[in-house]
Image (tube, grey):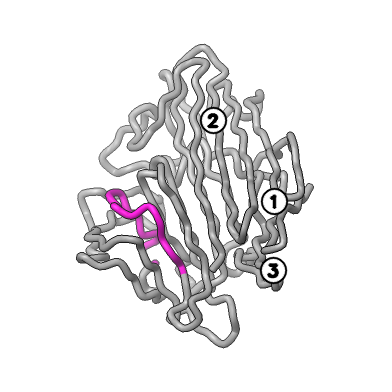
Amino acid sequence: MVIQIGDQTGSAQIDTMGAQLISLKNVSGTEYLWQGNPAYWSGQAPLLFPMVGALRNGKTMIDGKEYEMKRHGLARKMEFSKLDSTTSSATFSLRASDETKKQFPFDFDLTVIYRFHSSALTTEFHVANLGEKPMPYVLGGHPAFNCPISKEERFEDWMIEFEQNETAECPQIDLHTGMIFFHKRVPILKNEKTISLQHSLFDQDALVFDSLKSKKVKLCSSKSGHGVEMDFAGFDYFGIWSAVNNAPFVALEPWTGCATAEDEDDDFYHKRGMTLLQPGQSAKHEFTIALL
Protein backbone atom coordinates (compact mmCIF):
# COMPACT_ATOMS: atom_id res chain seq x y z
CA MET A 1 0.00 0.00 0.00
CA VAL A 2 1.27 3.46 -0.93
CA ILE A 3 0.40 6.47 1.25
CA GLN A 4 0.81 10.05 0.02
CA ILE A 5 1.32 13.03 2.29
CA GLY A 6 2.17 16.66 1.63
CA ASP A 7 1.10 20.27 1.64
CA GLN A 8 1.07 23.22 -0.76
CA THR A 9 4.88 23.04 -1.07
CA GLY A 10 5.29 19.42 -2.17
CA SER A 11 4.57 15.77 -1.45
CA ALA A 12 5.99 12.43 -0.35
CA GLN A 13 4.89 8.85 -0.92
CA ILE A 14 5.62 5.95 1.43
CA ASP A 15 5.17 2.24 0.74
CA THR A 16 4.05 0.04 3.62
CA MET A 17 6.59 -2.54 2.38
CA GLY A 18 9.55 -1.55 4.50
CA ALA A 19 7.85 1.78 5.34
CA GLN A 20 10.09 3.05 2.55
CA LEU A 21 9.97 6.52 1.06
CA ILE A 22 9.39 6.09 -2.69
CA SER A 23 8.77 9.66 -3.90
CA LEU A 24 9.70 13.16 -2.79
CA LYS A 25 8.54 16.04 -4.98
CA ASN A 26 8.45 19.83 -4.78
CA VAL A 27 5.41 21.92 -5.67
CA SER A 28 6.28 21.92 -9.37
CA GLY A 29 6.35 18.11 -9.43
CA THR A 30 10.12 17.69 -9.71
CA GLU A 31 11.15 14.28 -8.36
CA TYR A 32 14.10 14.47 -5.97
CA LEU A 33 14.17 10.85 -4.85
CA TRP A 34 15.94 8.16 -6.85
CA GLN A 35 13.27 6.00 -8.48
CA GLY A 36 15.17 2.72 -8.48
CA ASN A 37 16.76 1.07 -11.48
CA PRO A 38 18.25 -2.44 -11.23
CA ALA A 39 20.88 -1.46 -13.79
CA TYR A 40 22.38 0.64 -10.98
CA TRP A 41 20.50 -0.04 -7.73
CA SER A 42 16.88 -1.12 -7.36
CA GLY A 43 16.44 0.43 -3.90
CA GLN A 44 15.30 3.95 -3.09
CA ALA A 45 15.31 4.76 0.61
CA PRO A 46 15.33 1.62 2.76
CA LEU A 47 15.10 1.84 6.54
CA LEU A 48 18.00 0.05 8.23
CA PHE A 49 17.16 -1.92 11.40
CA PRO A 50 18.43 -3.60 13.55
CA MET A 51 21.63 -3.52 11.52
CA VAL A 52 23.45 -1.12 9.20
CA GLY A 53 25.64 -2.62 6.51
CA ALA A 54 26.96 -6.17 6.59
CA LEU A 55 27.71 -8.82 9.17
CA ARG A 56 30.80 -10.97 8.78
CA ASN A 57 29.67 -13.80 6.47
CA GLY A 58 26.10 -12.63 7.08
CA LYS A 59 26.08 -14.13 10.58
CA THR A 60 26.24 -12.96 14.18
CA MET A 61 26.12 -14.40 17.69
CA ILE A 62 23.39 -13.34 20.12
CA ASP A 63 23.33 -14.88 23.60
CA GLY A 64 25.48 -17.77 22.42
CA LYS A 65 23.34 -18.67 19.38
CA GLU A 66 24.14 -17.99 15.72
CA TYR A 67 21.73 -15.93 13.61
CA GLU A 68 21.79 -14.95 9.95
CA MET A 69 20.82 -11.48 8.77
CA LYS A 70 21.24 -9.93 5.33
CA ARG A 71 22.84 -6.55 4.72
CA HIS A 72 21.04 -3.61 6.34
CA GLY A 73 18.84 -5.77 8.55
CA LEU A 74 15.31 -7.09 8.32
CA ALA A 75 12.96 -4.09 8.40
CA ARG A 76 13.41 -3.12 4.75
CA LYS A 77 11.92 -6.43 3.59
CA MET A 78 8.97 -6.49 6.00
CA GLU A 79 5.42 -5.22 5.58
CA PHE A 80 4.62 -2.48 8.10
CA SER A 81 1.17 -1.75 9.50
CA LYS A 82 -0.24 1.71 8.84
CA LEU A 83 -1.33 3.08 12.19
CA ASP A 84 -2.48 6.54 11.14
CA SER A 85 -2.34 9.07 8.33
CA THR A 86 -3.39 12.67 7.71
CA THR A 87 -2.85 14.95 4.74
CA SER A 88 0.66 15.76 5.97
CA SER A 89 1.77 12.80 8.12
CA ALA A 90 1.71 9.02 8.27
CA THR A 91 2.65 6.50 10.97
CA PHE A 92 3.78 2.91 10.42
CA SER A 93 4.72 0.09 12.79
CA LEU A 94 6.66 -3.16 12.66
CA ARG A 95 6.46 -5.52 15.63
CA ALA A 96 8.48 -8.60 16.37
CA SER A 97 7.05 -11.86 15.04
CA ASP A 98 8.11 -15.48 14.71
CA GLU A 99 9.60 -14.51 11.34
CA THR A 100 11.69 -11.61 12.69
CA LYS A 101 12.90 -13.68 15.65
CA LYS A 102 14.58 -16.12 13.28
CA GLN A 103 17.01 -13.27 12.55
CA PHE A 104 16.75 -11.02 15.61
CA PRO A 105 15.52 -12.78 18.79
CA PHE A 106 13.99 -9.79 20.55
CA ASP A 107 10.51 -8.42 21.17
CA PHE A 108 10.57 -4.96 19.61
CA ASP A 109 8.30 -2.32 18.17
CA LEU A 110 9.66 -0.06 15.45
CA THR A 111 7.38 2.90 14.77
CA VAL A 112 8.15 5.26 11.89
CA ILE A 113 6.44 8.64 11.51
CA TYR A 114 6.76 10.73 8.34
CA ARG A 115 5.84 14.42 8.46
CA PHE A 116 5.87 16.78 5.47
CA HIS A 117 5.85 20.54 6.16
CA SER A 118 7.11 23.55 4.21
CA SER A 119 9.19 21.66 1.62
CA ALA A 120 10.75 19.38 4.23
CA LEU A 121 10.19 15.75 5.23
CA THR A 122 11.00 14.52 8.73
CA THR A 123 11.45 10.80 9.38
CA GLU A 124 10.99 9.98 13.07
CA PHE A 125 11.80 6.58 14.54
CA HIS A 126 10.66 5.16 17.87
CA VAL A 127 12.29 1.89 18.96
CA ALA A 128 10.79 0.08 21.95
CA ASN A 129 12.04 -2.98 23.80
CA LEU A 130 8.92 -5.00 24.64
CA GLY A 131 10.85 -7.99 25.95
CA GLU A 132 12.42 -9.05 29.21
CA LYS A 133 16.10 -8.79 28.28
CA PRO A 134 18.34 -5.92 27.08
CA MET A 135 17.99 -5.34 23.33
CA PRO A 136 20.86 -4.11 21.13
CA TYR A 137 20.24 -2.44 17.79
CA VAL A 138 21.60 -0.13 15.12
CA LEU A 139 19.30 2.07 13.07
CA GLY A 140 19.77 4.20 9.97
CA GLY A 141 18.31 5.89 6.92
CA HIS A 142 19.38 5.33 3.32
CA PRO A 143 17.52 7.82 1.06
CA ALA A 144 19.06 8.20 -2.41
CA PHE A 145 18.54 11.32 -4.50
CA ASN A 146 18.59 11.96 -8.22
CA CYS A 147 21.94 13.50 -9.08
CA PRO A 148 21.65 15.43 -11.24
CA ILE A 149 17.96 16.34 -11.19
CA SER A 150 17.85 18.18 -14.52
CA LYS A 151 19.08 16.94 -17.90
CA GLU A 152 21.07 20.16 -18.33
CA GLU A 153 23.50 19.22 -15.57
CA ARG A 154 26.10 16.53 -14.98
CA PHE A 155 26.95 14.48 -11.90
CA GLU A 156 30.19 16.47 -11.68
CA ASP A 157 28.23 19.73 -11.38
CA TRP A 158 27.03 18.63 -7.94
CA MET A 159 28.70 18.75 -4.55
CA ILE A 160 28.44 17.75 -0.91
CA GLU A 161 28.59 20.68 1.50
CA PHE A 162 28.82 20.26 5.28
CA GLU A 163 27.72 23.05 7.59
CA GLN A 164 31.20 23.33 9.17
CA ASN A 165 34.75 22.91 7.98
CA GLU A 166 35.79 19.31 8.56
CA THR A 167 39.01 17.35 8.69
CA ALA A 168 38.02 13.78 7.99
CA GLU A 169 39.60 10.49 7.01
CA CYS A 170 37.16 7.75 6.05
CA PRO A 171 37.81 4.09 6.89
CA GLN A 172 38.22 1.72 3.96
CA ILE A 173 35.50 -0.80 3.08
CA ASP A 174 35.94 -4.20 1.48
CA LEU A 175 33.71 -4.08 -1.60
CA HIS A 176 33.00 -7.80 -1.49
CA THR A 177 32.33 -8.35 2.21
CA GLY A 178 31.20 -4.89 3.35
CA MET A 179 33.60 -5.06 6.29
CA ILE A 180 35.02 -1.75 7.55
CA PHE A 181 38.75 -1.28 8.29
CA PHE A 182 38.97 1.57 10.80
CA HIS A 183 42.76 1.37 10.95
CA LYS A 184 43.02 1.97 7.18
CA ARG A 185 41.78 5.44 6.30
CA VAL A 186 41.59 7.68 3.25
CA PRO A 187 41.84 11.50 3.61
CA ILE A 188 38.67 13.16 2.32
CA LEU A 189 38.52 16.63 3.90
CA LYS A 190 41.22 18.87 5.34
CA ASN A 191 39.70 21.85 7.16
CA GLU A 192 37.12 22.27 4.40
CA LYS A 193 33.42 21.75 3.99
CA THR A 194 32.88 20.92 0.31
CA ILE A 195 33.39 17.74 -1.71
CA SER A 196 33.04 18.06 -5.48
CA LEU A 197 31.28 14.98 -6.76
CA GLN A 198 32.92 12.53 -9.09
CA HIS A 199 32.05 8.87 -9.56
CA SER A 200 35.53 7.73 -8.54
CA LEU A 201 34.78 8.81 -4.95
CA PHE A 202 32.72 5.64 -4.61
CA ASP A 203 35.10 3.15 -6.22
CA GLN A 204 35.55 1.56 -2.79
CA ASP A 205 31.91 1.79 -1.67
CA ALA A 206 30.55 4.44 0.71
CA LEU A 207 32.35 7.31 2.39
CA VAL A 208 31.84 6.64 6.11
CA PHE A 209 32.28 9.58 8.48
CA ASP A 210 32.60 8.77 12.19
CA SER A 211 33.76 12.07 13.72
CA LEU A 212 31.88 14.92 12.03
CA LYS A 213 31.27 18.22 13.79
CA SER A 214 28.53 19.08 11.31
CA LYS A 215 24.96 17.94 11.85
CA LYS A 216 23.69 19.22 8.52
CA VAL A 217 24.82 18.46 4.98
CA LYS A 218 23.73 19.58 1.52
CA LEU A 219 23.71 17.61 -1.70
CA CYS A 220 23.26 20.30 -4.31
CA SER A 221 24.12 21.66 -7.73
CA SER A 222 26.96 24.16 -7.90
CA LYS A 223 25.14 25.73 -10.86
CA SER A 224 21.47 25.92 -9.87
CA GLY A 225 21.67 25.44 -6.10
CA HIS A 226 18.88 22.85 -6.29
CA GLY A 227 19.18 19.71 -4.20
CA VAL A 228 18.51 18.66 -0.61
CA GLU A 229 19.75 19.52 2.86
CA MET A 230 19.70 16.85 5.57
CA ASP A 231 19.66 17.53 9.31
CA PHE A 232 20.99 14.40 11.01
CA ALA A 233 21.55 15.58 14.59
CA GLY A 234 21.60 12.60 16.93
CA PHE A 235 23.31 10.22 14.52
CA ASP A 236 26.98 9.51 15.23
CA TYR A 237 27.84 8.05 11.83
CA PHE A 238 27.13 9.37 8.36
CA GLY A 239 27.50 7.59 5.05
CA ILE A 240 27.56 9.00 1.51
CA TRP A 241 27.18 6.43 -1.25
CA SER A 242 26.62 5.89 -4.93
CA ALA A 243 26.85 2.66 -6.91
CA VAL A 244 30.24 1.92 -8.48
CA ASN A 245 28.86 1.82 -12.06
CA ASN A 246 28.57 5.62 -12.48
CA ALA A 247 25.06 5.69 -11.07
CA PRO A 248 23.04 8.94 -11.38
CA PHE A 249 22.19 9.17 -7.68
CA VAL A 250 23.77 9.84 -4.29
CA ALA A 251 22.53 8.44 -0.98
CA LEU A 252 22.81 10.39 2.27
CA GLU A 253 22.79 7.96 5.18
CA PRO A 254 22.51 8.89 8.87
CA TRP A 255 23.36 5.91 11.11
CA THR A 256 23.46 5.31 14.85
CA GLY A 257 26.10 2.61 14.26
CA CYS A 258 27.88 1.00 11.34
CA ALA A 259 28.67 -2.23 9.52
CA THR A 260 30.85 -4.87 11.13
CA ALA A 261 34.44 -3.74 11.56
CA GLU A 262 37.37 -5.99 10.73
CA ASP A 263 38.67 -5.70 14.32
CA GLU A 264 35.37 -6.75 15.95
CA ASP A 265 34.26 -10.23 16.93
CA ASP A 266 30.89 -11.61 15.81
CA ASP A 267 28.95 -10.93 19.01
CA PHE A 268 26.09 -8.58 18.12
CA TYR A 269 26.32 -6.84 21.50
CA HIS A 270 29.93 -5.85 20.79
CA LYS A 271 29.37 -3.87 17.61
CA ARG A 272 30.43 -0.22 17.32
CA GLY A 273 27.66 2.27 17.94
CA MET A 274 25.27 -0.29 19.40
CA THR A 275 22.29 1.14 21.28
CA LEU A 276 21.22 -1.04 24.19
CA LEU A 277 17.62 -0.70 25.37
CA GLN A 278 16.65 -2.13 28.73
CA PRO A 279 13.29 -3.96 29.09
CA GLY A 280 10.44 -1.48 28.72
CA GLN A 281 12.76 1.26 27.46
CA SER A 282 12.34 3.17 24.20
CA ALA A 283 14.44 5.56 22.10
CA LYS A 284 13.74 8.20 19.46
CA HIS A 285 15.80 9.11 16.40
CA GLU A 286 14.93 11.46 13.53
CA PHE A 287 16.34 13.20 10.49
CA THR A 288 14.90 15.83 8.16
CA ILE A 289 15.29 16.34 4.41
CA ALA A 290 14.66 19.87 3.14
CA LEU A 291 14.17 20.44 -0.60
CA LEU A 292 16.31 23.22 -2.07
Q: Which quarter of the figure has residue 271?
A: top left
- For the residues labelled 2 and 1, the Cα–Cα distance comes to 19 Å
Question: In which image quadrant can residue 105 be found?
Answer: top right
Q: Residue at x 58, y 54 (%)?
A: 45
Q: Amino acid at mark 3?
A: Val
Q: Secondary structure at mark 3?
A: loop
Residue type at mark 1 is: Ile
Mark 3, residue position = 27
At x 57%, y 63%, the residue is 41
State the separation of the CA atoms marked 3 and 1.
17 Å
Residue 83: numbered disc: none
Q: Is residue 106 magenta?
A: no
Q: Residue at x 51, y 43 (%)?
A: 286
Residue highlighted by disc 2: 127
Residue farthest to the right, as pictured: 1
Would residue 56 be seen by someone viewing this image from the given angle?
no
Highlighted range, magenta: 202-219
Classed neighbour count for the residue bearing mark 1: other residues with Cα under 10 Å, few (<14), some (14–19), many (≥20): many
Q: Secondary structure at mark 1?
A: strand
Sequence-first disc among 2 and 3:
3
The C terminus: image quadrant: bottom right
Please give the residue where the numbered disc 1 appears in the rendered image: 14
- Place of residue 196 in the rendered image (x, y in percent of width and height, measured from the top left): 36, 75
Q: Is 4 or 148 nearer to us in this picture?
A: 4
| Residue 289 in view (yes/no) | yes
Mark 3 and mark 1 in contact? Answer it, CB < 8 Å.
Answer: no
The location of residue 182, given as percent across then percent down, is 25, 48
Marks 2 and 3 sit apart, C-alpha to C-alpha, by 32 Å
